[in-house]
Every structure is written in structure tokens, then in C-alpha cells.
Amino acid sequence: MNTMGSAAITAAEYVMPTGRLGLKGPVVKPAPGTLPLRGDLAHIALAETHLAAHYVIPLVQIVGEEGASMRLMPRDDSEIMHVISAGTALEILDEAGDWVWATIGPDGPSGYVELDALA
């Protein structure tokens, strides 16, 4: 069920990887708030380079006219990692309550944005 409001939401255009996926050597774990990668979930564009339990083709939604703060954790008192301008396209990877886990793109930054900040 999509609860992200009535604004137009579209799937981002990413191609599913073909062939066998697997890590071919050690990978440096990115710092929190950088790549759209959590232990349980990652952006589909990272499927060939990073291991996650699930990969997501994100939905795209626009940041509302007030702009948005991207936080490290889904809490009002969490550190603001990035300030996002109004009208910016966000790639939504997960939704939980009043927050979405989102990224600007597969290279990041990534973090939590309040659902109300989206158009």
C-alpha cells in the first residue's frame, strides 16, 4: 500500500542486473549516510558491488516547497546529514511510519526524510 500522498510517484529507471551476482573480493563498508546501503536493503544500482539481503528499484518523489533535512536516523533529534532543496527528485527506498529512507541517487547521499517534506 502506498501511503506517500497523492503526488505523482514513478519508478526510477534502473536496469535489473543480469547473470550471477556475487562479491569478488573485499569491499570497504561505506560510512553511514553515504551510499544507499543498509544491512537489510540496498539500491538496485549497488547489486553488483555490495551485498544486501534485498535490492530495491526506488520510487521517485519530489521534495516539497519547504525543502527537507536528510537525517542519519528516522528521528527529529538525529544529526542532519544533508539539506535538500525544494523540487529535488528523491529516490525512495523504504517507508516506515512518518519517515522514508531515501537517496539523491545511487552514489548518495542517503538518509531519512520526513514524509511530510515530500510534495
Image: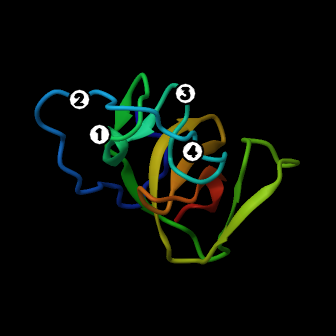
Disc 3 to disc 1: CB gap under 8 Å: no
Please tell me whether mark 4 or mark 3 is closer to you in this view.
3
Per the image, label 4 sits on a secondary structure element best described as strand
Q: Amino acid at mark 1?
A: Glu
Q: The disc labelled 2 sits on which kind of residue?
A: Leu
Q: CA distance from mark 4 to mark 2?
A: 24 Å
Q: Position of residue 51 (x, y in %)?
A: 41, 29
Q: Give SS at disc 2.
A: loop
Q: Are marks 2 and 1 in contact (CB under 8 Å)?
A: yes
User: In the image as oriented, which residue stretches furthest toward the front?
Assistant: 25
Q: Which residue was labeled with disc 4?
A: 101
The alpha-carbon separation of the residues under discs 3 and 1 comes to: 15 Å
In-front residue for pair 77/44: 44
Residue drawn 46% across the image and 49% down it: 92
Q: Nearer the viewer, residue 22 or 71?
A: 22
104 lies above or below 40: below
Look at discs 1 and 4 and give the one toward the viewer: 1
Name the kind of residue labelled 3 in the image.
Gly
Disc assigned to residue 118 = none
Tell me the residue that label 2 is attached to. Answer: 21
Q: Is residue 13 left or right of residue 24?
A: left
Residue 48 circle label: 1
Residue extending farthest left: 19
In the displayed structure image, the side of residue 73 where residue 24 appears, left or right: left
